[in-house]
Image (tube, rainbow, N blue to C red):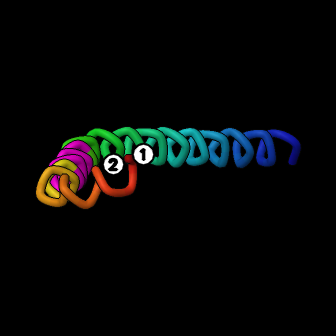
Amino acid sequence: MEEYFLHLWDDFDDVMGICRHVATVMAAELVAASAPVIAATSGALLAGAATLVLSHRHLLKLFLA
């Protein structure tokens, strides 16, 4: 009877190891796939902010003077 539970526990441990591995790989793939999107979004926001500041330079001079 003890061998049966030991075998069952071993199988359960194998399944949990596989689940842990799959979760880790999926998280790594998600981070790797989202990095270019985050970089592009950051670049677009930075470009938009620079365009806004440069297009309203005359207003900026009024507030800073």
Q: Residue at x 77, y 47 (%)?
A: 4
| Mark 1: secondary structure | helix
Q: Position of residue 18 (x, y in %)?
A: 50, 42
Foreground pick, 65 / 7: 65
Q: Residue at x 38, y 56 (%)?
A: 63
Foreground pick, 53 / 20: 53
Label 1 sits on residue:
27
Q: Is residue 51 magenta?
A: no
Quick check: marks 1 and 2 in contact, CB under 8 Å? yes
Which label was assigned to residue 14?
none
Q: Position of residue 45 (x, y in %)?
A: 24, 54
As shown in the figure, which amino acid type bears the numbered disc 1?
A: Ala
Q: Which quadrant of the view contains residue 51?
A: bottom left
Report the span colored magenta. Answer: 39-49
Label 2 sits on residue:
30
Q: Look at the image and tell me whether residue 9 can be seen.
A: yes
Give the main secondary structure of the magenta stretch.
helix
Q: Residue at x 42, y 45 (%)?
A: 27
